[in-house]
Amino acid sequence: MYGFNLQTIYQEGKTPADSLERLRYEKSAYEHTKKCAKLLAANYPSLSQAIVQRAEEAYEGYYLLSGSATKTFIGKPASWRENPNHNKEYEYELNRMNQWLDMTYAYFLTGDEKYVQRIILEMEMWIRDCPPPLKLDEEGALDFYGGPKGRWWRILECGIRLYKTWGPIIEIFAPMDVFPEDLFSKIVEILYFQAEMISRFSPVLWPKSDHNHFVMENMGLFKAGGLFPEWKKAELWKKQAVDSLCRALDVQVLDYGAQIEGCPSYHNNCVFWFALALQFGRRYGVTFPAWYETKLDSMGEWALYMTRPNGTNVAWGDTSVLTVTMAQAAVCLYIGNQDSKWLFYSAYLGQREGLLGAFSTYVWYMENPEVFLQDFEEALAHPKEPALPPTVWNKSMKQMSYRSSWSDKDLSFFYSCRSPVQNLHAHIDPCGFDLSALGQAIFVDPGKYTYQEGEDRKHFKQMFWHNTLMINDRDAWEYLASWAYGPMRQGDILHMGQGPRLTWAVGYHNNYAPKVHQRVLCALNSKYVLVLDRITGLKKADKLSMQYHFDGTNVQEEANQFVCRKEDVITTLASTMPQRTIEQAYVSDEVDQKRESSLLVFRDRAEANDSEKIYATFICPDKYRKISITKLKHTREGDMVLISAQIDQEAYQLQYNIKTFDMQILDA
């Protein structure tokens, strides 16, 4: 079945019985988990109760997996090869066995051994019911295990099982003498097979080391080598894993600590994996280079910049707004370096609930949970304003994050001109942005919602539901499938400027070549936003459309303006693009959950003499009242574009130079 026997994988004179005997006497993982459970129950009983409730539901066969917004019956015990949600992500997630973690912690919180017994039973059933279909040296093995055909035997799931569920759970429960020798030998075989698969195939699948899958797979290889030092390849695999993780961190983490994929959820998850690697190193006797910890710490910066003033994620690409936020990154950085500053910053951003959730999830990984608790509670009690500039231009990511300050009522926008995108977790959104003001998300990216192929996936990834400009009703590049795009051309942020009462960024992309879209996004007086769009290379009858995706449904057209109401914030939007419609759309805060939203759509058409079109759009939010935008117009005088508007009783006139990208406010 596996292409090897136990005698060939162990050092001379060693057997699975030796591994089991050692693990039975190494009680540190058992005692540490016991200590964490006691600490959690004593200090946050509601969090411990929530774990027990989830564990009890999992024990009864109910768990939240992709394809349903509510918990699915997965079997009692789990039916590993069934897929009641008809969603391939369901198969992947179920076979990661994350439900075992809740049951593990519930045992230590309640003392009820039924949770341990269920985990051991499901291990035995999985080994019996899910044997690997191909030996690793068989023809087609790489293609099979490296892609969706592998289903529960995909390489990514092998890595996750090793580093997150099977590996730690074996360490924790071995002192309880719950693994009969014959079962343990089967566990050894199936874990070795998965480690060998990762060692052989992961470098081939990810030769550039530039994907989050590569990180998780090598975390699994690292855990396997550390967990079984009796294996002949243990030291070799630890070295391979550490070399791979160092290479991945170097390649994937760019300026300001930004993870290369550009999605906040994946950025914050990568913080966990890279940080946990440092802990594995301390545990299994491997030293990381000094630069690794420095670069890991920098990831806290970009987690901060991808956070809206209300504490939620900017919904960029395949991101969930409410989960895997800066709060997770702050707690996970502590796993790696025991530095509490990110906890204080996260608390300042109003992420108390997110921090508590992250505490419940990650306290089990803390080497000194008592000290972590002290630092955690100090951060909640005395948050600190981030000691970083609120606005940055990340040139390597082709993104810019603007905030008027670190207040929760800031005007804030996240602006991106990434083209080509790094991988397919990105959406089709060149020159797009996400805007918040006065404590509310106003104009937003739609979020992730699902990975499942179909119309929903298409809508959430395509251009029309993003705050962008389209030409001839076409995407900037072709959407082929959930995980396939057509060719992409260049885009970038060309300039960021700051002056009296203004902060602006200039981006462009040429995916409609020979047509080029250039967009200026400008914060005015730290409370209004001007969007200036310039499209060149047009031909007669070319159609143009701009979309503004409002995170709400209360929208009216009043006096040639859109008025958007969301709780106590009223946002007025007016544009020189003439035609206006309101269309229904959706946004997603968490996977498999969506709610209605509104698309504010402007349209125009190029005439015979229109090789260039320019549009000025003002966005003016305020508390409780509607701001009036009148006398909005723009003119082109040589290299200068002059924009004027009456906003309430104040007249504004701005000047923008299309060659130098300079912008200024003129005396009205």
Image (tube, grey):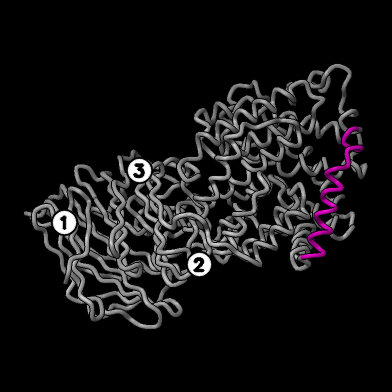
Give the residue type at disc 3.
Answer: Ser
Q: Of tags 2 and 3, which is closer to the observer?
A: 2
Q: Is residue 105 above or below residue 557?
A: above
Count numbered badges in the picture. Answer: 3
Q: Residue furthest left?
A: 609
The mark nearer the N terminus, 2 or 3, is: 2
Q: Is residue 26 magenta?
A: yes
Residue drawn 86% across the image and 46% down it:
30
Q: What's the distance in space between the residues labelled 2 and 1, CA to CA?
A: 36 Å
Q: Report x, y in % for residue 242.
A: 64, 30
User: Which residue is the site of mark 1?
Assistant: 613
Indicate left or right for 39 with 335 as reference: right
Q: Type of residue at label 1?
A: Lys
Confirm whether residue 666 shows in the render.
Answer: yes
The label nearer to you, 2 versus 1, is 2
Region in magenta: 22-43
